[in-house]
Image (spheres, rainbow, N blue to C red):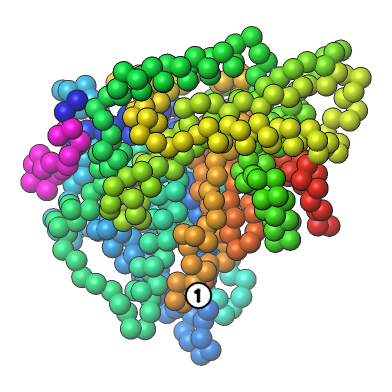
């Protein structure tokens, strides 16, 4: 493998190109495969709400414009800091390969054209959450929407920042770091001392992010022993699935074409959050472990019952943030606009049992703590086996390639809906480790969140904490599932966690 192809090179005046690696290719191919839906598969979708308090006697209209201008400055500045954000992946018909292309702006009109395409102000009475669920189409480049929600106080100016990008440009954790950088620059531009800096486009090229292969200095291919380990893991995964009932979501929808991706969320109180964390520590577990166990049991609870009880398995993966495996400076928020993550090689397997119909009256009622702890122990054992080491990193490209569909060069039919939808869980961790509560005059008033837009039949669940409040959210597609169904599932997962850990729910 010629790694020179992964280095950004100027191919014409001001235009830079490089090959994409397996991680980027996977998301590019998925987006192209589902292009016929009119949506972008796994589009990164994120939101955060902020407010600026108006000083007494200040001109509200002037303040409103000043806030907008601060974010316009920040967006332009991030074009310089993270130019990969303004790149696009295209298919080269000559080489039959996808490549990432970035065009450096040479004039102010170039910048303005990009701003017109990628920076939009929304004032239609919706909040950022409501606008997100309208699922606006994604253009060629990452886009930021400055949503002006209805004002709740005459003394505050509110903005919900809604961000969308192709997943081959940025990932979830990178997006959270990126939004933090955005708030930092916007608050500086808004401040009375106006600590803004001038910059010259053309020199931003040094900030273009490499693919994960280069950022982590991966070998061209795994060693024979590493390949043997990969094949062993694949055999273990296949054996775990073979001749076993693998739990999936019951699906009754007759729709064959996805519609809008939606997000719903369930929040725990600060006392519930603290208790969950404390009880998890007592069991040597993390909240992510506990919620994985609960998802398995909640999924078990919604299966069709037979006359006799039957064994079943929940199978999924862990999503691993690999930024810490990159070399400096690629392991910092300086390279937020990049795809530096992967799934675990070995699947998580939780064994459980679907009860007989005669026992079904208890289904969906109180969770037996002993049963929950048995599932939790399976998750803990699995988690201890996951190691991000040299052997694992060497097979990351292979893991992406294994789930990458062939890139369709022309129009192609949208894949049929998956009849056995999975439920996955991604851990966003503690957002307080990335965001400050305030960035000068900008105060965060609604939690930062990020999801991958869902156009398949499954649920994508996300777990994170902000200001001591834990949030379990889900992305789903409205063509296959209803909001009330998702909320009931999230509530069942929450109940299983709390009952299993013996945590009292607030009234």
Q: Quadrant of residue 306?
A: top right
User: Closest to the observer: 160 or 318?
Assistant: 318
User: Closest to the observer: 478 or 267?
Assistant: 267
- The residue under the point 90% across, 23% down is 359
Q: Which residue is mark 1?
A: 52
Q: Which residues are magenta?
A: 3-17
Q: Is residue 327 magenta?
A: no
User: Closest to the observer: 382 or 408?
Assistant: 382
Crowding near the residue tagged with mark 1, few <14, some 14–19, many ≥20 C-alpha atoms within 10 Å: many
Q: Quadrant of the C terminus?
A: bottom right
Q: Secondary structure at mark 1?
A: strand
Q: Quadrant of residue 399?
A: top left
Residue 36 locus on image (x, y percent): 43, 26
Residue 91 locus on image (x, y percent): 25, 28
Outermost residue, top direction?
A: 243
**Does the rendering let one see residue 13?**
yes
- The residue under the point 68% across, 34% down is 377
Outermost residue, bottom direction?
A: 57
Location of residue 262 with respect to 162 vertically, above or below: above
Residue 435 lies left or right of residue 323; in this view the side is right
Residue 159 locus on image (x, y percent): 50, 65
Q: Quadrant of the N terminus?
A: top left
Q: Is residue 7 magenta?
A: yes
- The residue under the point 15% across, 23% down is 94
- The residue under the point 21% across, 40% down is 101
Residue 178 lies left or right of residue 87; in this view the side is right
**Does the rendering let one see residue 412?**
no
User: Closest to the observer: 338 or 328?
Assistant: 328
Residue 220 locus on image (x, y percent): 24, 27
Location of residue 346 with respect to 489 vertically, above or below: above
Q: How many marks?
A: 1
Location of residue 498 with respect to 370 vertically, above or below: below
């Amino acid at each position: 493998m010629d790694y020179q192809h992964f280095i950004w090179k100027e191919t014409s005046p001001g235009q830079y190109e490089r090959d994409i690696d397996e991680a980027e290719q996977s998301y590019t191919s998925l987006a192209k495969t589902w292009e016929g839906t009119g949506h972008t598969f796994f589009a990164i979708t994120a939101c955060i709400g902020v407010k600026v308090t108006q000083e007494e006697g200040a001109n509200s209209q002037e303040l409103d414009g000043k806030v907008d201008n601060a974010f316009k400055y920040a967006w332009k500045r991030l074009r310089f800091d993270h130019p990969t954000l303004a790149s696009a992946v295209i298919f080269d018909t000559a080489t039959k390969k996808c490549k990432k292309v970035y065009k450096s702006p040479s004039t102010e009109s170039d910048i303005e054209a990009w701003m017109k395409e990628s920076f939009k102000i929304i004032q239609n009475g919706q909040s950022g959450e409501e606008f997100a669920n309208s699922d606006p189409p994604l253009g060629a480049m990452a886009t930021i929407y400055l949503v002006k929600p209805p004002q709740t106080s005459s003394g505050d100016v509110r903005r919900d920042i809604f961000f969308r990008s192709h997943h081959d440009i940025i990932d979830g954790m990178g997006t959270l770091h990126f939004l933090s950088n955005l708030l930092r620059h916007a608050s500086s531009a808004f401040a009375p001392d106006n600590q803004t800096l001038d910059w010259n486009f053309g020199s931003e090229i040094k900030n273009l992010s490499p693919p994960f292969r280069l950022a982590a200095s991966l070998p061209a291919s795994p060693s024979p022993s590493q390949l043997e380990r990969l094949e062993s893991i694949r055999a273990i995964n296949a054996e775990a699935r073979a001749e076993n009932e693998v739990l999936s979501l019951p699906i009754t929808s007759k729709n064959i074409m996805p519609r809008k991706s939606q997000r719903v969320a369930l929040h725990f109180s600060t006392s519930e959050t603290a208790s969950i964390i404390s009880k998890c520590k007592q069991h040597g577990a993390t909240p992510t472990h506990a919620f994985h166990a609960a998802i398995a049991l909640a999924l078990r609870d919604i299966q069709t019952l037979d006359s006799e009880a039957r064994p079943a398995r929940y199978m999924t993966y862990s999503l691993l943030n690999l930024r810490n495996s990159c070399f400096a400076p690629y392991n910092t928020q300086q390279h937020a606009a990049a795809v530096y993550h992967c799934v675990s090689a070995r699947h998580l397997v939780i064994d459980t049992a679907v009860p007989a119909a005669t026992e079904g009256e208890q289904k969906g009622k109180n969770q037996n703590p002993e049963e929950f702890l048995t599932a939790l122990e399976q998750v803990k054992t699995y988690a201890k086996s996951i190691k991000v080491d040299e052997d694992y990193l060497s097979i990351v490209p292979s893991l992406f390639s294994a789930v990458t569909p062939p890139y369709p060069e022309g129009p192609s039919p949208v894949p049929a809906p998956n009849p056995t939808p999975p439920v996955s869980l991604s851990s966003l961790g503690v957002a307080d480790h990335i965001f400050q509560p305030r960035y000068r005059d900008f105060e965060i008033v609604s939690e930062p969140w990020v999801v991958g837009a869902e156009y398949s039949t499954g649920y994508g669940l996300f777990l994170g904490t902000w200001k001591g409040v834990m949030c379990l959210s889900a992305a789903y597609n409205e063509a296959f599932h209803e909001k009330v169904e998702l909320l009931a599932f999230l509530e069942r997962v929450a109940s299983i966690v709390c009952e299993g850990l013996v945590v009292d729910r607030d009234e």
